[in-house]
Image: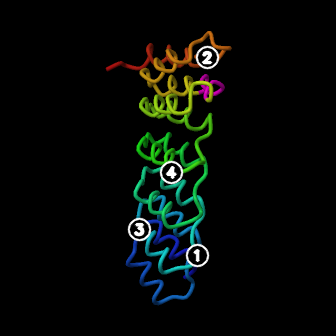
């Protein structure tokens, strides 16, 4: 077999397979093993790889764990590894609606979020609590340029509460930022052709 065997076993959290490969084969693994197992939330495997293997990981480990809401993995990586994360961690946590992860990252890390990624993805996912937290934490001016896209995404996905909140907090008269004709078209389509509950 190749190093892909241990990498693949790690991605699925298969610790017994990893232990067998470690004891019986010499190929080892790559940094992808820890990156992928962290993304999958397999803390025991992350810890095993950390203590038993020397390959380490990349920033993708913490970024991936944030994307999937694995706060225990993020906290452990932060305390025991030096690779850190990128602003993609916060953006991806916003996309998944993982507010607890976002709060932890904001308190414990300095990377922050991108102005477009976090707000756009939170709006697209219908995560109103995340949208509100981003606004309260970073301020309205940080997101002004991305609001048309965020509103378009909320409308496109049918997230009326998010669309209404964005409209109320980023009105049309602020330098052209706010709801666009595209967002209104999506909203009209949804109200006209999609049955409401």
Q: Earlier in the sequence, mark 1 or mark 4?
A: 1
Q: Which residue is mark 2?
A: 180
Name the quadrant of the C terminus: top left
Residue in the image at 46% along x and 17% along y: 164
Label 1 secondary element: loop
Boundaries of the magenta span: 143-149
Marking on residue 55: 1
> Disc 4 to disc 2, how far (Cα)?
36 Å
> Disc 1 to disc 3, how far (Cα)?
17 Å
Residue in the image at 59% along x and 59% along y: 59
Q: Which residue is mark 3?
A: 13
Q: Nearer the viewer, mark 1 or mark 4?
A: 4
> Disc 1 to disc 4, how far (Cα)?
25 Å
Mark 4 and mark 3 in contact? Answer it, CB < 8 Å: no
Crowding near the residue tagged with mark 2, few <14, some 14–19, many ≥20 C-alpha atoms within 10 Å: some
Marking on residue 108: 4
């Amino acid at each position: 077999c190749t190093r892909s065997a241990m990498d693949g076993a790690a991605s699925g959290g298969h610790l017994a397979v990893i232990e067998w490969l470690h004891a019986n084969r010499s190929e080892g693994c790559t940094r992808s093993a820890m990156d992928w197992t962290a993304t999958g939330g397999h803390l025991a495997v992350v810890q095993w790889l950390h203590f038993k293997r020397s390959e380490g990981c990349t920033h993708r480990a913490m970024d991936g764990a944030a994307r999937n809401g694995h706060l225990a993995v993020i906290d452990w990586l932060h305390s025991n590894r030096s690779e850190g994360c990128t602003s993609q961690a916060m953006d991806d946590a916003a996309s998944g609606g993982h507010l607890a992860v976002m709060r932890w990252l904001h308190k414990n890390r300095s990377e922050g979020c991108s102005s477009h990624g976090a707000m756009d993805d939170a709006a697209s996912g219908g995560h109103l609590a995340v949208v509100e937290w981003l606004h309260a934490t970073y301020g309205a001016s940080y997101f002004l340029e991305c609001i048309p896209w965020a509103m378009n995404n909320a409308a496109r996905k049918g997230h009326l509460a998010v669309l209404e909140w964005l409209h109320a907090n980023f009105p049309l008269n602020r330098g052209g930022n706010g709801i666009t004709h595209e967002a209104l078209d999506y909203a009209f389509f949804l109200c006209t052709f999609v049955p409401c509950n």
